[in-house]
Amino acid sequence: MKRRVHQPGGFTSVELLLVLALSAVVIGGAVVSYGTIVRTQPSVSSIVTVPLGLNRLQNFYGLASSTLNVAMAPQYGALSQAEELREQFLTDTISATAVFCLPRDDINTWRPAVIPYNPALHEELDTPQKFRVHIIANASVPEALYRDYRNPLNDGASVPQNASIFILGYSKYAGYLKVNAIYDIDVIRFTGLTEPNGIYASVKRYADSATTTTPSVLGYMGGYDVFFPPSVPNPTSTTQWAADGFTPLFVTFERATRLALRETPATIERFKRASERPFYFVWWPDPSARHLGPLANTFASSDPRQAYNQMAGRTSFMFTVPMFPAL
């Protein structure tokens, strides 16, 4: 019987050299590809020191500072924060009894947990305008804090740059409406020679803390911000990016039955489109957008799409919010 010869296992030196050579080629190619990818990615780590001022920072975040370090767009870290805030906003609005969007020009200095309201004495609050009139008359709110404004191109007035969204809920306090949350959207343009040219945008949520057992002033509970550079690279004057901006922040669509009430100017009528329940289109600035440069808007002023068509492609944070979600 022939005897079997046992061959030892493993690789020969020639085989090892061949494997090492192939590995070097593969790793080298991966390094070159990775370097190319990194070089072609947009910068997402630029930080801008924004001179918001002590008053704004104290109001927005409770900070005792006059400047804030903010990431420049496109900013994907802030995008994740915006996604989280979007989910919270949808949760807040689903359980709301009413949502009132109020435009403003300056900072919001009024964030109550409750609002006085007696249904036997006070008028029905079925529009943002009536809500504004009510809080001025019954909650000592300054008349200039929120604008008496009713959608773009209705009265020739400038479009407000900022907005506050009041989300009301069921109240256990007799004689009061409960404010579950307030969302403040602020868009601030910087054009000074010593300022970083661009637009600071932020969305902030204010609500009761988890330990609150009695009505109080709502506190800051989270948000996101981003700094958008001018749409014109290296501008030599502010006129080159004067059309940059982000307005309007919301459009209100009223009940179609209100067409029976003819109003002037006629452009008001174009927003009376809700078959049953009035609603808003709400927009938030998108941290992944590169800038807030102008877009073409070809709709006539008589068409409601003219009011929001310029938002196309500028943000992925768009909401359709009923004025009375829980009804």
Image: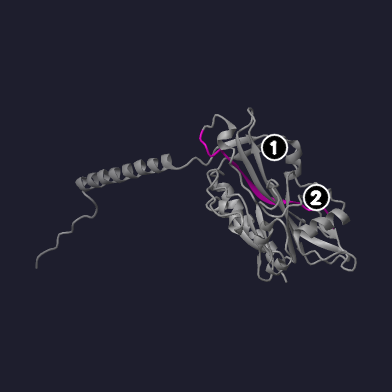
Callout 2: SS: loop
Q: Residue furthest right?
A: 121
User: Pointer 2: residues within 10 angstroms few (<14), some, or many (20+)?
Assistant: some
Residue 99 shown in magenta: no
- Say which label, 1 or 2, has the lower sequence index: 1
Which residue occupies 22% across, 46% down?
Answer: 18
**Left or right: where does residue 148 sit relative to residue 86?**
right
Q: Nearer the viewer, residue 85 or 251?
A: 251
Residue 90, quarter of picture: bottom right
Tell me where the magenta segment starts and ends, as one range.
Answer: 215-233
Residue 217 shown in magenta: yes
Q: Nearer the viewer, residue 301 or 169?
A: 301
Which three-letter amino acid code belongs to the residue tagged 2?
Trp
User: Is residue 90 shown to the viewer in this render?
Assistant: no
Q: Are marks 1 and 2 in contact (CB under 8 Å)?
A: no
Q: Residue furthest top?
A: 194
Which residue occupies 64% across, 61% down?
Answer: 270
Q: Which residue is mark 2?
A: 110
Q: Which residue is mark 1?
A: 52
Q: Position of residue 73 (x, y in %)?
A: 55, 43
User: Is residue 273 shown to the viewer in this render?
Assistant: yes
Q: Where the N terminus falls, by quadrant?
A: bottom left
Q: Position of residue 153 (x, y in %)?
A: 66, 51
Q: Where the C terminus falls, by quadrant?
A: bottom right
